[in-house]
Amino acid sequence: MDRMMQRRADRAQQYRGRSDPETLEYENILRRDPCSYLCGCDATCTDHIMPRIEGGPDHWSNFTASCQRHNGFKGSKSLLEYLLAQLAR
Ligand SMILES: [Zn+2]
């Protein structure tokens, strides 16, 4: 594993399992929104705007509404990168 991969893994580990009460409450609110991936479905999950592997925290400011299908669908891309890639198709 190269140094950059190790740093990403360390950061992901650092943030794992640290959901505070505000974040849990915000996740409940997000589940009433439409999916952020513009599929037209209702959100049943939340997803990270900036993936954890890129250092995105488990904090409400990094969560967005997502349907079951899109939850984790974008892989290691950020939400913005994913949406821009979809528009470029
Ligand atoms: Zn969706």
Image (cartoon, rainbow, N blue to C red):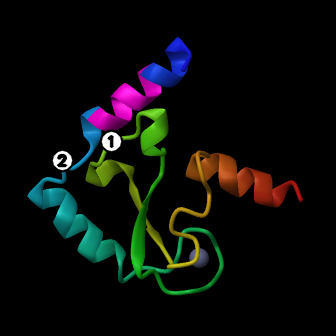
Given the current orientation, which residue lies at the most extreme top position?
A: 3
Mark 1 vs 2: CB contact within 8 A: yes
Q: Which residue is mark 2?
A: 18
The alpha-carbon separation of the residues under discs 1 and 2 comes to 9 Å
Which quadrant does ligand 1 occupy? bottom right
Main SS of residues in magenta:
helix
Find residue 80 and name its label: none
Vertical placement of residue 54 versus 62, above or below: above
Residue 86 position in % (x across, y down): 78, 60
The mark tally for this picture is 2
Where is 1 relative to 42, above or below?
Answer: above
What's the residue type where badge 2 is placed?
A: Arg
- Residue drawn at point x = 53 percent, y = 62 percent: 72
What's the mark number on residue 57? 1
Which contiguous range is marked in magenta?
7-13
- Residue found 25% across the figure and 75% down from its top: 28
